[in-house]
Amino acid sequence: MDLFLPSLGFGLVTASIIALAAVGFTLQFGVTNIINLAYGDVMTASAMVAYICNNGAGLNIWLCLPIGAAFGALASLALNRGVFVPFIRHGASLLTIVIVTLACALIIQNLLLAIWGPNFFSYSMSSGRSVDALSMTFTVAQLAIMGISLAAMFAIHLLLTFSKLGKAMRATASNAALARSCGIRTERIIDLTWLISGALCGLSGVVLVINTTSFTAGTGAGFLLVIAAAAILGGIGRPYGAMAGALVIGISTEVSAAYINPSYKDVVAFGILVVVLLIRPQGILPGSTSEKGVTT
Amino acid sequence: MSTAYQFYISSLLIYFGVDILACWGLNLQIGVAGIINFAFVLFQAAGAYTAAVLTLGPAVSPANGGFQSYIGGANLPFPLSLLAAALVGALLSLVVGVIALRRLRADYLALVMLVVSQIAVNVVQNQNNLFNGSAGLSLVPEPLTDVVHLAPLSLAYQWFYAGLTAVICLIVYFFVHQITGSPLGRALRAIRDNEQAAAACGKNVFLLRMIAFVVGGAIAAISGAMLVLFIGTWAPSAWLYPETFVLLGAVVIGGGGNNFGVMVGALLVPVAFLEAPRYLPAIPGHPELIEPLEWIITALLMLLFLWFRPEGIFPERRRRFPRSAPARDLGGPV
């Protein structure tokens, strides 16, 4: 039996989830220059909020999805306004900010662990019937996840290319001081960036759990490394690169899992990353990201 | 002092020594050279595994239980296993450094290091014949028992090992002090504070950072080896990436760049801080709460230090040079 097409199907689902997460992650970096290592743990927290709405309040999981996304947006904004920006205003270096985000990551993860304990949590939902297409098999839930991801990617594309907000975000990303002197209110743009990327973060956290069916307090932190691999692969700070990176990482991990030991799929992802870094440290897309200071 | 208490104190001293070694290594990389090595614990693990498989006999022999599978099994005596560990740590740092230190900026590098740390855990967990997979290695014999004629696991041996750790600490301190106090150390600090300026002064940034990275990696491996030879066991769960954060906390809180400060940090964070909750009354019904709370408090403490005293308890000593008179004569801005 040929394994390629079925595993490609899994790869597309995984890639959709990674793409949602990686675009949010890379947007945060691109506009504000903060590598937010707490990103994965905000994903877990969002998944937990959806879990409470789902299992506690009895809401349908697809209704909990926007609630999780809203939580992710607000939590990310709060994290930036409450912790990162004060530290930057206080004169923290790039290096210090990375350590601060890691500290926040550990605090969020261990708060979840302290409150809800070291358990596995599953949504009460059905994945729906299976649908066959081109000898790839998807559940209805997986098709929905791919649909959501495609829609989100398209929306991000429209936002960045055609809307005034998107253009302002790009202007802030490439030169915040210049953007400010052109009359762009960069502080508001940055708040909105954290809201949008945080929403993607929350969304990806919930769909990750919808796909894998259960999570623990450490799920997001583990997934962060795959997100980071996709983002670095595409050249960190570049949304289209993150989408491309997500496709490469998602498909290569699942296809390789079908042919070699599945527990090596993360090793394959990271192996690709190392090779790419050796050849092109700036990522797979043409052009390069240059060094800038932190933007508030 | 009761025997049990002496066991406790001597073990604590050995852990303290191991943490001091690790913190000096990390300080050389992050405090002196400004390399964010979030994969530090990987190099500690490399040393631990190397020392373990070189000290253990062949995996097939029933004397080792026959239940573990690993490479090596050389039955090497003590100083050799430690030196081999240091060598492996240095070589691994060389390989990782060539990939990671080449052209990556600081925060990019941090991310790549986290990923590298995770790759290594994945590989070791899944490749059972390397270091016995997720179960890890155990029954590593304690070194030099026949040389000093002490029974393994005896109290006298505990104190002997504590002394041995102290000697290793002294030797490593000598090396570290030589580096931080030399022109090499000054060049590294210059690169940390202003890479472009250091490069403009003709310093080879990549080479100098590589030196700090490789020496730091070798020291990390020595600390790992000293730890595994004492506790006799080592598994992937002992070196997940948050472990680096504890040592990082020690460096930041003690005082990055200051070897003495870092030593105090090692006493405060990994030893006192993770040991103190042992004496707290258990929270009724929630015995598992202690560990997450330890992490939360460590992280909060670190945030507080980064905010109120980013230079740590004992800041790096700045050398002051007398302002040179001729600069004014040239009429330039002073």
Image: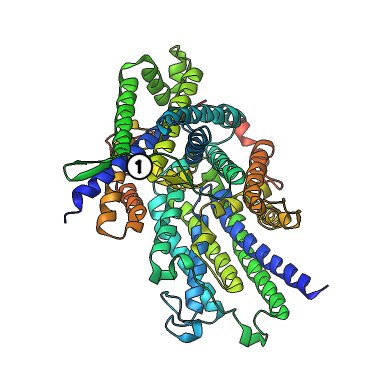
- Vertical placement of residue A215 versus A204, above or below: below
Q: Quadrant of the N terminus of chain B?
A: bottom right
At 48% from the left and 82% from the top, the residue drawn is B57
Which residue of the protein is positioned furthest toward the top in this rendering? A183
Instruction: Tell me which amino acid carries mark 1.
Output: Ala
- Vertical placement of residue B27 versus A80, above or below: below
Q: Nearer the viewer, residue B325 or B154?
A: B154
Residue B273 point in image, percent of width and height: 70, 53
Find residue B82 and report its image quarter: bottom right
Q: Quadrant of the C terminus of chain B?
A: top right
Dot 1 corresponds to which residue?
A230
Q: Nearer the viewer, residue B326 or B110?
A: B110
Residue A66 point in image, percent of width and height: 43, 27
In the rendered image, is residue B331 in sight? no
Within-10-Å neighbours for mark 1: few <14, some 14–19, many 20+? many
At 59% from the left and 79% from the top, the residue drawn is B143
Determine the chain carrying the residue at label 1.
A
- Vertical placement of residue A203 versus A118, above or below: above
Q: In the displayed structure, does residue B186 sit left or right of residue A24? A: right
Find residue A170 and report its image quarter: top left
Residue A207 point in image, percent of width and height: 39, 37
In the rendered image, is residue B225 in sight? yes
> How many numbered circles does the render carry?
1
- Vertical placement of residue A31 versus B270, above or below: above
Q: In the displayed structure, does residue B83 sit left or right of residue B262? A: left
**Colouring style:** rainbow
Q: Is mark 1 on a helix, strand or loop?
A: helix
